[in-house]
Image: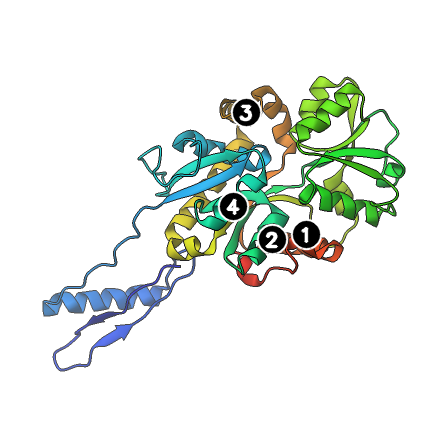
């Protein structure tokens, strides 16, 4: 938040000094009265010969940001292409220029969330794109020192099948599902949806947890499994390798059908609270640049897919087919709060530890 210093000026000889303090919101907007009073104060100072030092602009800060290979990184590719991707978190930018919003960035990519979280906690990163429930866990683990800036990915989870036996969540009873993501969004979403549809996730179904989504695809391709839960773009990867593989269930649609006031989310953008408080202008610039990158990606599928492939996130041909189903967004403010808080509430009711033991406070949500 931009803070304006008190301005003092002599208006007429022998008249008391006129002072005024104005405070703007995150948008930096000020009222017309504040502007008029400020102008009058400046005019008075000039006529009396006094000088008023302008408030110094915030020094450009390089935002150290990380994303996971997959949809959480796809929305950033326009920025990544412009500013480069480093092998590991670093403070020095790879590119000296700034964005049109004055932002400076250095990005890193990771294969798993547990590669990112420690660096964020230690302060080696300022911003990270992580699973939604991990953001809440980090908030609790650091005693409120994390802030969510935006929702960046809605639901991207699907049940895929080599066959035609699964038409509903209830049809999964007695079956084996291969999946990756134990202890994160995929597990909690699947367990919740199974339970809400009368399937006990511990006794009525077998969930074979793999360390990576690629292992699930391999199991399906080899015939070791015939049902999997996969996110995009891995659904597209699997369908390119396995003849007859179909999308049986869209878990976002299954969640919506419960009509519980929440939404299935996948990823969010989280930041260190200290960084947000110390560098508000850098945070605002990042959100503007991020939103612009997301808009560009969604409007330029082919070009975005080429960048995604070039950065080694996902093969370009796969990305081009998967992007329309990846639900890449940049949702901030009140809408972010409503979607995320509702989703986290569902998870907490299912398993409190899925959000770190307790629901985050309002200070977890940036801009409300």
The answer to whether the residue labelled 4 contacts the one labelled 2, judged by CB atoms less than 8 Å apart, is no
The answer to whether the residue labelled 1 contacts the one labelled 2, judged by CB atoms less than 8 Å apart, is yes
Q: Secondary structure at mark 2?
A: helix
Q: Which mark is residue 305?
A: 3
Q: CA distance from mark 3 to mark 2?
A: 32 Å
Query: Residue beneath label 1, please?
Result: 354
Q: Residues within 10 Å of mark 1 (few under 14, many from 20)?
A: many
Q: CA distance from mark 1 to mark 2?
A: 7 Å
Q: Is residue 335 visible?
A: no
* Sequence-first disc among 3 and 2: 2
Q: Quadrant of the image for the N terminus?
A: bottom left
Query: Residue beneath label 2, please?
Result: 137
Which quadrant of the figure has residue 288? top left
The image shows residue 282 at horizontal and vertical percentages of 38, 48
Q: CA distance from mark 4 to mark 2?
A: 12 Å
Q: Which mark is residue 118?
A: 4
């Amino acid at each position: 938040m931009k803070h304006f210093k008190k301005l003092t000026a002599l208006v007429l000889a022998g008249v008391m000094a006129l002072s005024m303090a104005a405070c703007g919101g995150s948008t930096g907007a000020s009222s017309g009265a504040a502007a008029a009073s400020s102008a009058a104060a400046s005019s008075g100072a000039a006529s009396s010969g006094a000088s008023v030092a302008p408030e110094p602009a915030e020094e450009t800060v390089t935002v150290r940001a990380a994303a996971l290979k997959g949809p959480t990184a796809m929305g950033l590719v326009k920025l990544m292409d412009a500013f480069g991707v480093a092998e590991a978190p670093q403070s020095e930018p790879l590119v000296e220029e700034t964005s049109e919003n004055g932002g400076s960035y250095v990005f890193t990519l990771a294969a798993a969330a547990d590669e990112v979280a420690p660096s964020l906690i230690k302060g080696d990163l300022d911003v990270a794109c992580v699973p939604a429930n991990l953001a809440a866990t980090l908030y609790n683990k650091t005693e409120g020192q994390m802030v969510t800036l935006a929702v960046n990915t809605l639901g991207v989870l699907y049940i895929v099948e080599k066959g035609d036996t699964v038409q509903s969540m209830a049809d999964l009873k007695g079956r084996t599902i291969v999946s990756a993501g134990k202890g994160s969004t995929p597990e909690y979403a699947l367990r919740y949806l199974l339970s809400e549809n009368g399937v006990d996730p511990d006794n009525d179904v077998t969930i074979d947890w793999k360390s990576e989504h690629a292992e699930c695809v391999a199991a399906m391709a080899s015939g070791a499994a015939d049902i999997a839960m996969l996110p995009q773009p891995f659904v597209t990867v699997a369908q390119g390798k396995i003849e007859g593989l179909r999308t049986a269930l869209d878990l976002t649609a299954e969640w919506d059908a419960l009509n519980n006031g929440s939404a299935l989310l996948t990823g969010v953008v989280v930041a260190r609270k200290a960084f947000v408080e110390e560098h508000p202008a850098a945070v605002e610039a990042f959100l503007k640049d991020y939103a612009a990158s997301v808009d560009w990606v969604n409007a330029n599928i082919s070009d975005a897919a080429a960048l995604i492939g070039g950065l080694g996130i996902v093969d370009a041909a796969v990305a081009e087919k998967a992007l329309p189903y990846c639900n890449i967004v940049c949702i901030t403010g009140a809408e972010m709060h409503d979607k995320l808080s509702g989703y986290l509430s569902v998870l907490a009711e299912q398993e409190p530890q899925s959000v770190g033991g307790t629901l985050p406070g309002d200070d977890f949500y940036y801009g409300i």
